[in-house]
Amino acid sequence: MSDLSMREQFAHTATALLDEDGSVAVLLADISAGLFAEAARRHPQRVINLGIREQLLVDAGAGLALSGMRPILHTFASFLVERAFEQIKLGFGHQGVPGVLVSAGASYDMAQAGRTHQAPGDVALIDTLPDWVVHVPGHPSELDTLLRAAVGGERPAYVRTSTQQNAQPQPIDERGRMTLLRAGSHGTVVAVGPLLDAVLAATSGMDVSVLYAATVRPFDAATLLATLQTPDVVLVEPYLEGTSARCVSGALAHRPHRLLCLGVARRELRRYGTPANHDRAHGLDPAGLRASLEAFLNAQCVGGTSPS
Amino acid sequence: MTNTITDAKRRYGYPDLRLLMALQTGDEKHDGASTSTLDVLWVLYEQILDVAPERAKDPERDRFYLSKGHGPSAYYAVLAAKGFIPVAWLSGFGDVESPLGYHPDRNLIPGVEISSGSLGHGLPLAAGTALGLRAQGNGARLVVLVGDAELDEGSNAEAIEFAGAAGLAALTVVVVDNHSTTWPWRGGVQTRFAVAGWHTATVNGRDHAALARALRRREAAAEPNVVVADVGAERAA
């Protein structure tokens, strides 16, 4: 396997797409420009660094799409999604053109940089908009497959890269289906993207199913329903906790169920350090996940009846 | 008779536009936001833009982005006069079944290139389209209409600086200047563009000949073009 980081893999795959397809363009706002230096030499009119101008980044990307091209837009998640959110809403959805937004700097990847460089609400924000595809790869080779699918697609897509990743890639279903990695009878844990390894470690020896999702929008309710035994569901998401709760609740609206949402907490930590420090603080390390899972799955239902 | 304003075979001229606007509002008096753009829009569609209803999908067509989407009745009147939309649509302006809203939607109205209404998006969108046309070797022109107060939005600054630096010569911005900005720029609107390397001209925004001269394609130009169409300050209501 390649030993590229996910962000390096993004540049590698995007460069290949530029070489293969004359309608693909990459727009940058200084971030990662160095990774695209060679691509910019080969394709000076289709690799464009706009400088530190994120509002322009998103609207100009939409403008490229209006001219019939397939834009890939990239910068840190906090500036791409939060700073330029109205541009995302109006430039792509409201105009009705596709485009692919690829972020770096997921949640607390840049723990030492502090809150200004952290956007754990990125997927939740995108989820306020209709018809977006959201990919959260857990490994560079998954990113390669998902980015190609997104750029070839007809819907706007958000692709979230992270420095945290799993040791091994999972096979990717281009239709966005979740993969059943373990079958168990006392609940289902849905692990999203780079949190898979932590979930596998945390659930070691537990009689639970583990589903892996690298695509969270559209949410694959069909696989959840098809594999569900005890209707106790735990969502483990590497961004804001509860982001996909509405999808699980919607899928299980017709039957009694319990749902635990784990992810990045809303509160601002005001701590620096490493991503591992933040994993522990948010309970997303294997020990923290294990404790939450045991407390939830062993708990009696309110009213005294245990789940059957 | 064939001379009623709604006759499908009729050809419309500039004197008809106020009647076409009146169909939308039921009133021949109009607010400044809609009438300030009327002359610029007419000159663009009559003399400048290489567009036609049957060429809506032609990649080589010129593009007109109405960024200042407020007060679109003059725009709808011109689109109706030029055959992009039926005159019969105009009386439904703002109705739930009408495609003509108080801000235009490109997905609902033939000939409308961008959906607008929120200020400060048309120029950055156009910068991207100019990049896309350039990358495709497409020689079409792009004209963006903004208001002087719309330029308060900082997103325009990002686009003005970049378009000047990148030499997006296919791009023309028309600033309809009705002196409505709360904090006017010292030296006038055009100074904002001039420092970023744009070709600038300021003309009387009601003078069709002067507008046409300033808006004409500038062969071999290396920089984007801004035309400040001064329509004077609005009268107090």
Image (cartoon, coloured by chain):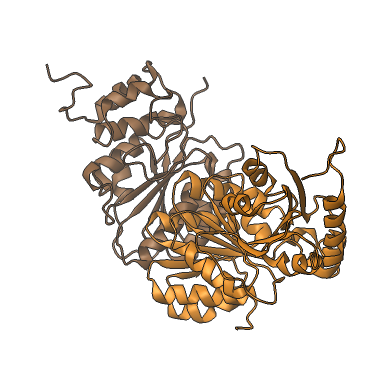
Colour assigned to chain B in the rendering is brown
Q: Quadrant of the N terminus of chain B?
A: top left
Q: In which quarter of the image is residue A198?
A: bottom right
At a point 57% along the width and 70% down the height, the residue shown is: A171
Residue A169 in view: yes
* Drawn side of residue A247 relative to residue B2, left or right: right
Q: Residue B131 location, x and y as percent?
A: 42, 63
Q: From the viewer's side, name the closer residue of A183 and B106.
A: A183
Q: From the viewer's side, name the closer residue of B5 and A166.
A: A166
Q: From the viewer's side, name the closer residue of A117 and B216.
A: A117
Task: Name the residue at the front extreme.
Answer: A308
Colour assigned to chain A in the rendering is orange
At a point 69% along the width and 46% down the height, the residue shown is: A245
At a point 43% along the width and 62% down the height, the residue shown is: A70
Q: Residue A263 location, x and y as percent?
A: 76, 55
* Drawn side of residue A93 relative to residue B106, left or right: right
Q: Quadrant of residue B12?
A: top left
Q: Quick check: B217 above or below B211?
A: below
Q: Residue A161 location, x and y as percent?
A: 64, 67
Q: From the viewer's side, name the closer residue of B4 and B210.
A: B4
Task: Name the residue at the left extreme.
Answer: B1
